[in-house]
Image: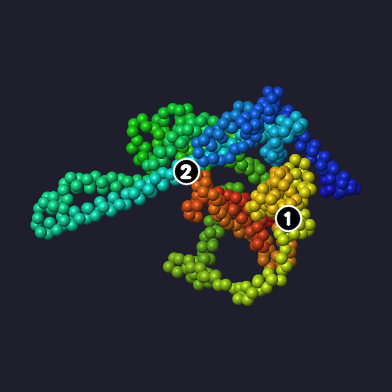
Amino acid sequence: LVARCRETQTILPAVSTIERLCADALVAAERRIETRIAKKLDNNARERLDGLLTELLEANVSRFIWLRQFEVGNNSAAANRLLDRLEFLRGLDIDHQILTSSPPHRVARLRRQGERYFTDGLRDISSDRRWAILAVCAVEWEAAIADTVVETHDRIVGKTWREAKRLHEERIADSKATVTDTLRAFTALGASLLEARNDGVPLEMAVAKSAEWDRLEQLVATGAQLSNRLADDPLAHVGQGYHRFRRYAPRMLRCLKLKAASVAQPLIAAAKAIGEMQASPSATDSFLRPNSKWHRHLRAQDQGDNRLREVAVLFHLRDAFRSGDIWLDHSRRYGDLKQVLVPMTTAQTNSRLAVPLDPQLWLTDRRARLADGLKRLARAARDGTIPHGSIKDGTLRIDRLTADVPDSAEELILDLYRRMPPVRVTDILLEVDAALGFTEAFTHLRTGVACGDQIGLLNVLLAEGLNLGLRKMAEATNTHDYWQLSRLARWHVESEAMDQALAIVVAAQAKLPMSRFWGMGTTASSDGQFFPSARQGEAMNMVNAKYGNEPGLKAYTHVNDQFAPFASQTIPATVSEAPYILDGLLMNEAGRQV
């Protein structure tokens, strides 16, 4: 508004007038969006949505609150609870197209408001706004619950595989004593046969002397059994998870609206057969790769026994969701990947893309650069001019870094700490906020007004930073109780606000005179730090063998060359960190400057 007034050479009104104009514009835009969504709902749809607030379930919980109480599970009971909610939302029959003409950020804002309102609060607001929030929540929660069902199935598959692997390892461990005894018996028999041959004694007499023929038959049978057991793999034991899958998988496959690429059509056909409770014909093995280990185990099954085949279908369904070969019709995480791609016409008209749109041209350029780089590397290796390294016998050797920190640096650090006066972390927060005003980023989700309770907001931020929790923070402070802190956290503290506040602090740190001694703030590094969690995490498929057998999560943090952590994400311990590199750089204002 100010920029437009300056362009038209309009005299700027008072600051309070500008603030009122902006507030009125925001409210008018929000009401326009709410009315637009509400008008697309017929009377029956409105009645069904209002019924979410009046229908009470067990423990006097409304249907609306029951619908939003969902999370990823790790067993068939949790999967069925999610399917209950998904089927109910499908029964509301709210058209997904009612949100197509609304900006995505407005839809997300209405959804977040619905997730924070209690039932009584929704009853008290205007009709159009209430219907808009309920409709957005119904559509968005349907996609979110469908994603949660897929994630729950992923964890159940992982749990079944770990149990099969553990059972396989236990059987091998239990067979060690038998293997040792069998090998010793065969060693003794072989020694007797060799001794008999050297002495000219008939071999039949040597066998009868060292081990009876019945004993020899037992040893041969035991050896064959041990050979099969040691040559086996965990796939031989995944069938024990059949009954677990059977309790929810057919219902899940009927409820989810699956779409697939051409390469996954055989898998979709097999999955639909399971969903329709039909016997899976042997032809459905076409979803397996020709060299898959599953073929050997499936051929060993009895005629008409399709239990292991159904388990194989569900295992491969998990992998297809991960790869994107199968997707959901209405989803935020497992949707069609083509929908997030930029149209070719838009990419061709974008002048900021400094890359050729023809892949052959790009590959030709990269090949030329690679060839030139290899020539320069070969020349440097031949002349011995590789910086801090050399190539000998086809191996690149890097010189060990030497410490360039003087010995007196440690004493200087301790001296600086002694000179700094002790200060409370709360005083630092108040002082930094007075200088930067980073708390203004934490606006009210509904009104967009900055939080007026500065002390309460800083208490919430401190509780988050110390991982203390709101209840313990309420016990530690004498200014706010738990419910006051909970209300502030629910309506003001969001990830977007955290990113904006962190960007303000990082930008201020970059302006400090001392920061130029560290770097220019244009480069960054990122890494994930593993944090152990409770033992229940093992059942939630959060165990990464790289960090041992303890379950946990990873905090993936980006730090620039001025030692400012400008982005942090909590990611599962079992996923690759590579996809999250761009998220930290592009999903916040500070990262875009790197």
Whether residue 29 sits left or right of residue 222 in the image: it is right
Q: How far across and how far down the image is residue 39, in percent?
A: 73, 28
Which residue position holds label 1?
504
Q: Earlier in the sequence, mark 2 or mark 1?
A: 2
Residue 130: assigned label: none
Which residue position holds label 2?
159
Whether residue 229 sits left or right of residue 429 in the image: it is left
Q: How far across and how far down the image is residue 592, in percent?
A: 67, 54
Q: How far across and how far down the image is residue 7, in percent?
A: 85, 48
Q: Nearer the viewer, mark 2 or mark 1?
A: 2
Q: How far across and how far down the image is residue 120, in percent?
A: 72, 33
Residue 80 seen from this side: yes
Asked if 62 appears above or below 425 in the picture, the reply is: above
Camera-side residue of 563 and 323:
563
Q: Quadrant of the C terminus?
A: bottom right
Type of amino acid under label 2: Lys
Whether residue 232 sits left or right of residue 479 in the image: it is left
Q: Residue at x 59, y 73 (%)?
A: 404
